[in-house]
Image (cartoon, rainbow, N blue to C red):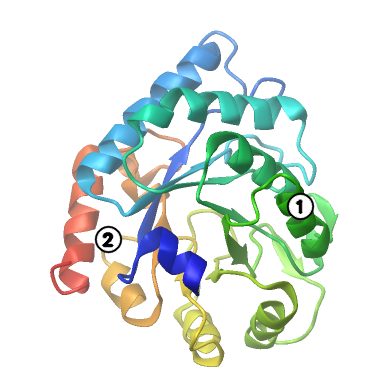
Amino acid sequence: MSQFQDVFGAKKPVIAMVHLGASPGTPLYDAERGIDGILAAARADLHALQAAGFDAVMFGNENDRPYELKVDPATSTTMAYVIGRLRDEITVPFGVNVLWDPQACFAVAAATGARFVREIFTGTYASDMGIWAPDAGAALRYANRLGAGGVARLYNISAEFADSLDRRSLPDRARSAVFSSIPDAVLVSGVITGEAAAMVDLEAVKRVLPHTPVLANTGVKHDTVADVLAVADGCIVGSALKRGGDTWAAVDPDRAADFMARVRAARGGQ
């Protein structure tokens, strides 16, 4: 738990997403706005989230649809470029999530100085992207070669857009992943971006992992965050902070500020 505490401290951290625009080469890339447009939108979201008081931010390429299990180098280099341009403006711990490529996550983290990564590191899934079988051993060894072995690792153990081919229960898979693959935290997700993890799943995973941080990974909303933090050791939030609650819209500063006001109340004023 030490790396998690080193990054986030003792409180239950709330990590806000900075969703980058689609990368060059992907079907939804906006060539007219270009990379300068990606940078400008990310800068506006970053400043709104920091002003609202979030504990950390995470840069992700959620709009690089259809998703890939091994990303094009243009994706990771674009992310590194944008984060690098913003680096001096970031005032909170930050992480990266390169969907769905663990090694690319560590490469971008090493290049930018990110403190944590989020990814699917373990398991076998039938997914929208085909059969999904990540290799935590290869990813962590790659991180060590890059000098990124100290980057905190947040393992999503209930993959979105996929169904586990491992018929063990979610708590059993979570407990096994902690033993075999040494995450710093475990994340519990809903079935798709923006949809909530079932509270019964969150409770069950936390029950079997009392000494490992367990976070809600998707679908946390203003009216549910207090209940989520009563069970979980933190959460990641994106869509609820956007204008109209739309994942692909810009961050709404008022929604972001209201969300963190509710978080502070749930944490007893912290």
Q: Return the disc, 1 or 2, that comes first in the chain's sequence.
A: 1
* CA distance for labels 1 and 2: 29 Å
Return the residue nearer the eye: 72 or 220.
72
Q: Residues within 10 Å of mark 2 (few under 14, many from 20)?
A: some
* Residue under the image location 77 percent in, 31 percent down: 72
Return the residue nearer the eye: 150 or 267.
150
Q: Quadrant of residue 173?
A: bottom right
Q: Quadrant of the C terminus?
A: bottom left
* Residue under the image location 33 percent in, 37 percent down: 251
Mark 1 touches mark 2? (CB < 8 Å): no
Q: Is residue 167 left or right of residue 149?
A: right
Residue picked out by circle 1: 128
Q: Residues within 10 Å of mark 1 (few under 14, many from 20)?
A: some
Secondary structure under the numbered disc 2 in the rendered image: loop
Can I make out residue 22 in this image? Answer: no
Residue 151 circle label: none
Vertical relation: 87 (above or below) 106: above
> How many numbered discs, if any?
2
Residue picked out by circle 2: 222
Vertical relation: 117 (above or below) 167: above
Q: Is residue 263 left or right of residue 123?
A: left
Return the residue nearer the eye: 83 or 215.
83
What type is the residue that disc 2 sits on? Answer: His
Image location (x, y in percent) of residue 52: 22, 46
Vertical relation: 36 (above or below) 21: above
Secondary structure under the numbered disc 1 in the rendered image: loop
* Residue under the image location 19 percent in, 42 percent down: 254
Image location (x, y in percent) of residue 230: 31, 80
Which residue is at the far top?
32
